[in-house]
Image (cartoon, grey):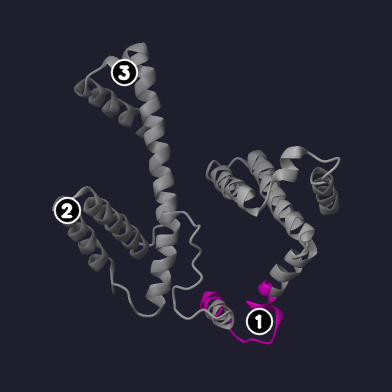
Amino acid sequence: MIERLVEIMVRLRDPETGCSWDVAQDFATIAPYTIEEAYEVADAIARNDMPDLKDELGDLLLQVVFHARIAEEAGHFALPDVVAAISDKMERRHPHIFGDGAEGGHPLWEQIKANERADKGAGGALDGVAVGLPALLRAGKLQKRAARTGFDWPDPEGARAKVFEEIDEVETATSADHQEEEIGDLLFSVVNWARKLGIEPEAALRRANDKFERRFKAMEADAGPAFESLDLAAMEVLWQRAKVSNEQR
């Protein structure tokens, strides 16, 4: 079945008879679409929309096939090499299932990953955290890596106190650049506090975005065409009404 999709991509990328848009793409131009499709998979999961999830997983799979085809054309690797590599990795990281390791689970997985990074020449605990990750997600990964070395708050209270410390530093910043730096530190600290509380910050912010969007649209619907002409006090009344309405659903 996957062969059909691979053949479709081969035809789309044919320099003479293929699609001009597909032929013009490279790894860099396709990468943003790959990231977008991954988020759309997450969105379908969050909405528990299984038909949409099926479609979005297909879109994400297409991205893998697209990248693999570009690589094959350049003589780097092909889709079977991608499949073989991830299969080897999964077996290697689960020796308690596929080998003779007596114990497994997350600690073993993390140790094997660390060994793999060392084999690739990673010199420090933070090496290998992809720069292209969304900033919120990358912050969490950097913090988790640092925590494995023992550089971590012993409990959430230390992380919480750091958040308020960073708020003070934002308020006392002496320039726009300084304020931007301190806002960054504040966001980083909030991610750290969320991690210590066992909360995934990306998921939490996604829920907050959804909640804000839902309430704001309710405000617009409540006010009608006159919404943008209302003053802030009137909008606050609508906001509180929207909050009550949403919480009752």
Identify the residue shown where x is 73% and y is 65%. Answer: 82
Which of the pair 65/93 is nearer the observer? 65
Q: Position of residue 56 (x, y in %)?
A: 65, 44
Helix, strand or loop at mark 1: helix
| Vertical placement of residue 123 versus 69, above or below | below
Foreground of the two, 137 or 44: 137
Amino acid at the residue labelled 1: Pro
Extreme top residue here? Answer: 225
Position above or below: 146 against 239 = below
Residue carrying label 3: 228
Q: CA separation, marks 2 and 1?
A: 52 Å
Q: Position of residue 10 (x, y in %)?
A: 83, 49
Is residue 211 within the magenta segment? no
Stretch in magenta: 89-110
Please name the residue that numbered disc 2 is placed on.
Answer: 173
Q: Which mark is residue 95?
A: 1
Quadrant occupied by the C terminus: top left
Q: Label 2 sits on what residue type?
A: Ala
State the separation of the CA atoms marked 2 and 3: 33 Å
**224 above or below 47?**
above
Of mark 2 and mark 1, the one earlier in the sequence is: 1
Does residue 170 appear anywhere in the picture? yes
Q: Residue at x 41, y 31 (%)?
A: 214
